[in-house]
Image (cartoon, helix red, strand yellow):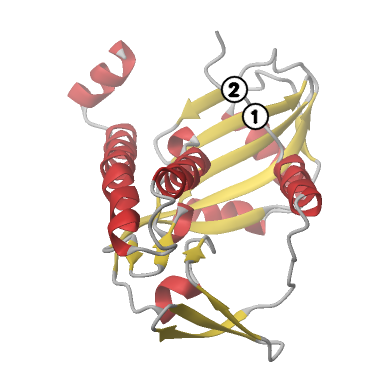
Amino acid sequence: EHLGYIIENDLIQSALFGGIDKHKIEYINAKLSGLKKTDNGYEVNLDNQTNLSCQLLVGADGANSQVRTLSAIEVTERDYQQKAIIANIISEKPFQQTTWQRFLSDSIIALLPLSENQASIVWSCKNHLADELTKLDGDKFNQSLSEAVEYRFGNLALESDRQVFPLIERSAKDYTMPNLALIGDAAHNIHPLAGQGVNLGFSDAKELNLQLLTNSDKVLGDFSVLRKYARARRLDNELMAKTMTGLDWIYKENNEPLRWLRGFG
C-alpha cells in the first residue's frame, strides 16, 4: 500500500476548474474588499464594485485570509524563524518513485517526485541560511542543493524559479461564526515538515460538506451545524500542528541524547 501520492498543483487546479465548468458555477475574478453581516448571512463586496449576498460564506482564502481579517476572528501565531524554499528540479539519477527527506542541523530538505527525474523541493531553512541560498545564482544553488543531499541523485538542477515564504504556524480562535466557516489555511496552517497542510484542508472541506448534507433540513449557515464542523476538525488540526512543532524541535536540537533518539528513530 502506498502512504500517499504527489500531485502537481496545476493538475489539482485543472480538476477544480473542470468541476466549476461541469456544474455551471460562476467564477468571478475579483478580490474581496469588504464584508457586511446581514440578518440572513453576508453581503460580500468585491474590488470590481460587485456586491453579492449569501447565506453561508466559506473562507478558503489562505493563511493571510481576508475573510478571517474582515470578520475580526483572532488568530494565534508561532514564528518558526525559518523560511521554505520551493522549486521544481531535475536530477541525473531517478528518484525511484519515493519521497526523500534529509534532516540537517540548520535545515530540512524534502524531495517530492513528479516523475523519474523530476521533483518538487521544499527546503525549510533557518532564516539566515534561506537568505543566503536565495541570493545564490542558479548554478551555485544547484551545487548547494546537490551537496546537501550528498549527490544521492547525481547533480540536481533548478527547473523553475524559486519561491520563498516564512514558516509561521497559525490557528484561528474560531473556525466558525453564524453564517461563516473557515477552512484550510484560513483556519490553520502548519510547518510543511510532513506535507500535511493540504490534506488537512481537504479534510476540512469534506467535513463541512458532510455536516451540511447531514443537516440539510436546517437553514444554510445555521450556527449549530457549523459548530459541529468546527468541533469535528479542531482536534485533528491542532494535534497535527503540535506534532509538526515537536518534530521540528527534535530535529533542530543538537544535544547528544536527541541525536541518539533521532538515530534510533
Q: Which residue is outermost to the front?
A: 217
Disc 2 residue type (three-letter):
Thr
At x 54% / y 34%, what residue is drawn?
Answer: 109
**Residue 172 at what x, y percent from top left?**
32, 62
At x 52% / y 17%, what residue is drawn?
Answer: 3
Residue 139, numbered label:
none
Residue 76 location, quadrant: bottom left
Residue 6, numbered label:
1
Q: Between residue 177 and residue 15, name the one nearer to us.
A: 177
Asked whether, in this view, residue 75 is left or right of residue 122, the answer is left
**Residue 77 at what x, y percent from top left?**
31, 62
**Contact (CB < 8 A) between labels 2 and 1?**
yes
Residue 25 location, quadrant: bottom right
Name the secondary structure under disc 2: loop
Q: Which residue is outermost to the left?
A: 257
Question: In this rendering, does residue 92 appear at all?
Answer: yes
At x 59% / y 26%, what residue is drawn?
Answer: 149
Question: Is disc 1 surrounded by few (<14), some (14 to 19) or many (20+) residues within 10 Å?
Answer: some
Give the distance between the C-alpha atoms of the residues marked 2 and 1, in whole angstroms: 9 Å
Q: Quadrant of the N terminus?
A: top right
**Residue 259 at what x, y percent from top left?**
27, 23
Q: Between residue 219 and residue 80, name the one nearer to us.
A: 219
Identify whether 125 is placed above or below 30: above
Residue 99, numbered label:
2
Question: In this rendering, does residue 131 appear at all?
Answer: no
Residue 232 location, quadrant: top left
At x 52% / y 60%, what residue is drawn?
Answer: 60
Mark 2 or mark 1: which comes first in sequence?
A: 1
Q: How many marks?
A: 2
Asked whether, in this view, residue 264 is left or right of residue 69, the answer is left
